Amino acid sequence: MKYRTFLKTGEKISLLGFGTMRLPVKDGDFAKVDEAESIRMIRAAIDRGVNYVDTAYMYHDGMSEVATGKALKDGYREKVLLADKLPLWMAKTPEDMDRIFNDQLKRLDVDCIDMYLVHSVSAPVWKRALKYNAIDFLEKKQAEGRIKHIGFSFHDDFEVFEEVLKAYPWDFCQIQLNYMDTNFQAGVKGLKLAGPMGIPVIVMEPLKGGKLTDVLPQSIKDIWDQAPVKRTPAEWALRWVADFPEVLTILSGMSTMEQADENLRILGEADPGSLTDTEHKLIQNVADEYNELIQYSCTGCQYCMPCPVKINIPDIIGRYNDWFVYEGNEKIMSDFKTWVNPKAMPSVCEECGACESHCPQHLPVPEIMKKAKEIFE
């Protein structure tokens, strides 16, 4: 495993961080985490050098924190930096911050969280953070020894990122970055802003929720086949992120041991600045081709859920995108009719806007539901 230095403490942080947003589940139910397999995967990754584990209050309807806490028993807690997050949009009063934090300590069964972030900061969330004096709250917890380092994860425009980054001497920050999102949200510009300020950057969604590694369109395969060095799509994507020296660690949400094995191999070899100009150009060609095919950049993060009328929003958006990426393949229509609940079709959308207000990508969800209805219904 490659390691990078957390400048504030001098600690060596594994280049691969274990993200627990996409743990293995049972019966296809997001809330039914397969604890035994999750524990096996997390511990196997730690045994092979991973020392950064990331979870959040709403991942797997709260069961991610529970499974993560169990995985860190038996001496594993002392081997890692544990990251968790404060979802301010779920706090209706300042007192709710304390309630949520105490819930997290209980679920994780720990006394201290090493890396604690204001979760999914956007302009409205930042406004609430200021209104609720969230920084004072975090500093109080830090003084009590309940958290060690204060940071934030981010989902909004660069201008908001710059405002938040300069508002407080953060210990670290977390942004979405992959070769498809170079100019999206904080983007590469945000990465390059944080670096000189001495604020290390944690990267999430390096594979864009698996979109860059799942079944590939033929036009994408054709471009990868031109590479002088043969690598998997996951390797190209992870190495692209690892090429930036400003990146401290790269979070990957892993659902299978095979994914963990591949990520461990890749980030056990990747050094900053190791990709050639030819390889960077190849990756850019892939990004350009994807941008021609993908309609809406949903990462499947589940922040839009639950839908009041039970629509599985990420699933519908994914199927809508697939219709265009895979050129209207009949199998996509067949799968839609087979797997989408007839009572939760896109047409039942009431355009309430609840999903849009929570979407980190700011997608026009009701509009997408209308378009999906036209295609699939």
Image: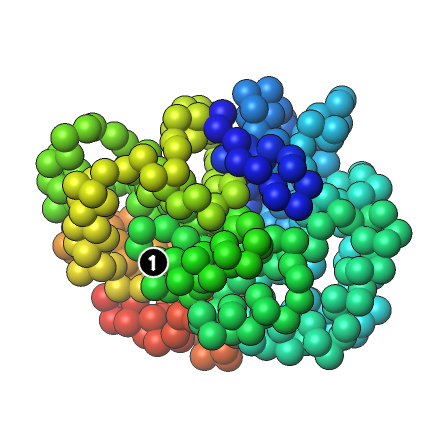
Q: Residues within 10 Å of mark 1 (few under 14, many from 20)?
A: some
Residue for point 12% across, 46% down: 219
Quarter of the rendering containing residue 365:
bottom left
Quarter of the rendering containing residue 53:
top right
Q: Residue farthest to the front?
A: 196
The percent coordinates of residue 32 (x first, y second) are 60, 41
Residue for point 67% across, 32% down: 80
Question: Image quadrant for the C terminus?
Answer: bottom left
Vertical comparison of 128 with 42: above or below:
below
Q: Nearer the viewer, residue 120 or 326?
A: 120
Which color scheme did the rendering employ for the protein? rainbow
Vertical comparison of 248 with 73: above or below:
below
Question: What is the count of numbered marks?
Answer: 1
Residue for point 17% across, 41% down: 278
Q: Residue farthest to the right?
A: 144
The answer to whether 272 appears left or right of 334 in the picture is: right
The answer to whether 220 appears left or right of 245 in the picture is: left
Vertical comparison of 70 with 130: above or below:
above
Q: Secondary structure at mark 1?
A: loop
The percent coordinates of residue 285 (x first, y second) are 17, 50
Q: Which residue is mark 1?
A: 182
Q: Nearer the viewer, residue 67 or 12?
A: 12
The percent coordinates of residue 261 (x first, y second) are 44, 24
Query: Quick check: can you spot residue 130?
Result: yes
The percent coordinates of residue 288 (x first, y second) are 19, 56
